Amino acid sequence: MRHQEKQKDISLKIKEARKLFILSGEIVILNFLSILPVTAATEEPVLSVVYGQENANQWTGITERLQATGMKYCVIPLNDVKSSADWGDRRVLFLPNVETLTPTQAIALEEWMSKGGRLIASGPVGSLSSPGVRQLLRSLLGGYWGFSLSDTEQIKPTKTKIPQWANQTELFGKVRGGVVIPNDMGAESPAVWNSKDNPAAVVTTERSTFLGWRWGTDTASAAELDNAWLKASINHYFTALAPSNRMKKIAGGSPNCSTTVAAAPRGQGAGEQGSREQGAGGQRSGSSPSSPLSPPPKTATAPIPRALPIVKPPSSQEAIDQLEQSVRLDVAPNSNEPIDSNQAIALQQELENLIGRVESAHLAVSADELNEGVGISERKQHLDTYTPQSVKEQPIELASTKLGELATSKEQALAQVRVIANKLPQLIAQKNYALARQQWLTAKTILWQQFPVDRRLAQPEIRAVWLDRGTIVRAGSKAGLAQIFDRLAQTGINTVFFETVNAGYTIYPSQVAKEQNPLIRGWDPLEDAVKLAHERDMELHAWVWTFAAGNQRHNEIINASPNYPGPVLAAHPDWANYDNLGNMIPVGQTKPFFDPANPEVRQHLLKLYEEIVTRYDVDGLQLDYIRYPFQDPSAGRIYGYGKAARAQFQQLTGIDPINISPSQPDLWQKWTAFRTEKVDSFVAQISEQLRKKRPNLILSVAVFPLPEQERIQKIQQNWETWARRGDVDLIVPMTYALDTSRFQRLAQPWIASKQLGATLLVPGIRLLSLPTIGTFDQLQLVRDLPVSGYALFAAENFNNELQKVFISTQGRVQSTKSEPIPHRQPFQTAAIRYTALQREWKFVFQNDPLQRPAQKISDFNNQAEVLRSALNQLAASPSPSKLLVAKASLTRFQSQFRVLMSQEIKSNSYQVKVWENRLVTIERLLRYGERRVQMRP
């Protein structure tokens, strides 16, 4: 994600309660908390406020608060914005609770801000926009809306470069909002939530202020607090400007901005516009409210300034749309925006981490080649054979263009990077920010060039790829699929998630499902895929959509009506789920969902999955969309009001859930728990029933790596419970990040979790928009973490350059024995991975200049050998007694490891942590293997 630079130091502090400024010939008195116009005749608005579809039903409250400030402002209809000029010529723009911007509007906003415009925003800004728009907004705002808090919380001040804010008591109080995730650089948090870890409630930069609640809504905050923050933000931007610029208008901005707000006739708000969508079988998605179990009716909204057509947000892959952490670190090389000490530390830390990954990769290669007897001359041959194109195109000059011995070349590069890292503070102190950024990017490229992408370094691991429906359709035949599987097999991929149920259609001719995908005719791709995979010693897992029943994007491809809910809901409209406004498809989304509480839905899906795993020799089943659609209860966007769910909840509590809200904590918690349990119990039911049919079936789930409580509130997906109960074998978090440092921060909480029982973690990496060497960087991080492999999304983005790197680094080795797959042969995998660790330790001890006492090395080797023997015996002939010995040996060795590695911790703490992580991976493989043995009939 691109990062907004941190705000400049503000040397001017307002010491008096009032201070007089001369602004372009007009006199305006500024307070800490108010802007009071002195001249009415010539005064012009200081603020432009954006009105759009999402804040239409909040406009009355927004208007009342704006008028209470006493400021002049003008209104900009969002639909009218087509260029930067349309954002107006006022110095400050306010985006209250606007969740959808088009790419054109976002780019125009960036241009408007580059001319000196300052932005104030509130609520989940842009959260329903396309991924590219969200990335740009995160750069402009200095952060993004992470997730909504389930309860009202106190916001409290922190120390920032705007110290006067901390002393304004009016800015702090009880608020219902969400956590704002600041960018790693360029942003600070003047207010935080008084909850665990004190997450940010407000994020500021030099050009923007981002309020983490829906400004102007009584359910979120008091009017006094809202107005205090708006005034403080505006005052901050005006006082930070030079006097000559304080009332200067934005160049090229349109002055056509209405200063009055005309209310529309009551009842003509956004919620009343247009007729309701026609559901399947002629039934309307919003039927009569007289029926207690009918879909909830759409509600009337407050008056709005003018009628607006409904704007449908841009659509894209949902896993990317909804995953709010898909961000990147983007350091603009020519930007001379200020960098403060915290940013400098972050930049240096990222270089140190990247150095660690490069050295870790080289150590793995060197230890493996030492074991294979590969000489220096052979290693030198590889150096000029391949450099990824994404690196070749970087206009970077290295210190030396001549390559000597491998270690010398690498050491020269690392030395050069460390020189750059050491000079960064000096460049920043000299305010040479552009050169500092250029040097940082140079260092990153130098390090990327040092990755050993031409030699094998992978150990036994799960190497999975999602083979998507589009790629299957384009293959067109068994011969076409064979080419895909050949390519994947060459690259060392050992597990394929084959899209089998998509948008309510099966990829194969089913006797349970209503219809095979119309893009497939006269062909059974699943039958061919199973054969092709097994012929190549690969596993084939059927990837199925669980509760997502249709897809508007798929409707476009097959020329169906946009409102077609999919073949199953078309035949069984009573199985549908609804939001609190009666919509089958939530606002801003593209998929209708089944009601997980409906017993007929559950029986249908179970029957379908049984057909797949008994009719086809698939190795596993992966559940996708095993959740409710995305919601935001604090914004009134709630889903789950299917007929069955409402009837069951009403029977349990005596209350129709459509009549409760988050403001009723006890009832709301029961409603959330009810929906979550419907998903939990279905996962358990699938696990139990399918394993009766196929005891060795591998069950995996594609899930969102959001914080547990936020995830339960937002999509009712509690995968920690499934893992602890042993319902699933693999947890595959869709951790889609466009830079490795962000991936690491996103992955850390669930990788370190102690709540996953004996389930294996397989993080997902999204290939789209990742350069080849960036993909390799993320893979190296995965291999340095305590996980069992990775999954790539998706096959359609698997390009030739990536194929070449994978063939070199993890491609299939010619041998008489197949490499074990962790979820299939966990004990054998553990033994092989531990042997690789021993080779690394041996290589380090032989080549590291650190002086170690002979007795210490002997003690280490003896303990390491005891563990090796225990793991090898377990792998050769598993038994409960051998497992007990192996687990005890591992625990003993882990407890002494840091003592044994005390010298290495001082010289290379990153590598010692990597070794500890790999020991944890072995520990998890033993736990998983123990569970698999116990499950055998």
Image: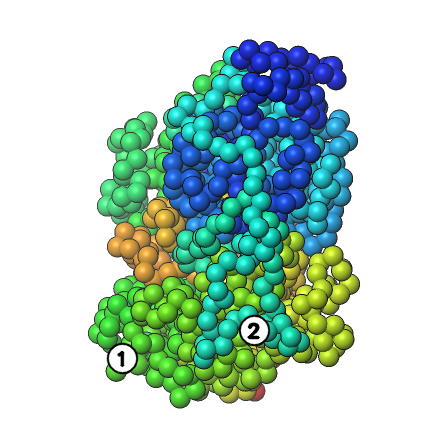
Q: Residue at x 49, y 18 (%)?
A: 248
Distance between mark 1 and mark 2 Cα atoms: 37 Å
Which labelled disc corresponds to residue 7? none
Q: Nearer the viewer, residue 857 or 542?
A: 542
Q: Quadrant of residue 707?
A: bottom right
Neighbour tally class for label 2: few under 14, some 14-19, many 20 plus, Cα within 10 Å: some
Where is residue 728 shown, x and y percent of the image?
56, 72
Q: Residue at x 31, y 30 (%)?
A: 396
Q: Quadrant of residue 440?
A: top left
Q: Left or right: where does residue 854 sit relative to residue 79?
A: right
Secondary structure of residue under mark 2: loop
Q: Nearer the viewer, mark 1 or mark 2?
A: 2
Residue 643 drawn above or below residue 227: below
Identify the residue position indicated by label 2 in the image: 287
Q: What amino acid type should be assigned to the residue bearing mark 1?
A: Arg
Residue 481 drawn above or below residue 216: below
Neighbour tally class for label 1: few under 14, some 14-19, many 20 plus, Cα within 10 Å: some
Q: Residue at x 72, y 16 (%)?
A: 18
Q: Nearer the viewer, residue 556 or 453?
A: 556
Q: Left or right: where does residue 106 sit relative to residue 646?
A: left
Identify the residue position indicated by label 1 in the image: 521
Q: Residue at x 26, y 31 (%)?
A: 402
Q: Quadrant of residue 577?
A: bottom right
| Quadrant showing the C terminus | bottom right
Residue 512 drawn above or below residue 67: below
Where is residue 841 shown, x and y percent of the image?
50, 49
Q: Can residue 841 be seen by looking at this rendering?
A: no
> Which sits earlier in the primary sequence, circle 1 or circle 2?
2
Q: What amino acid type should be assigned to the residue bearing mark 2?
A: Ser
Q: Left or right: where does residue 533 sit relative to residue 906?
A: left
Where is residue 427 shown, x and y percent of the image?
47, 19
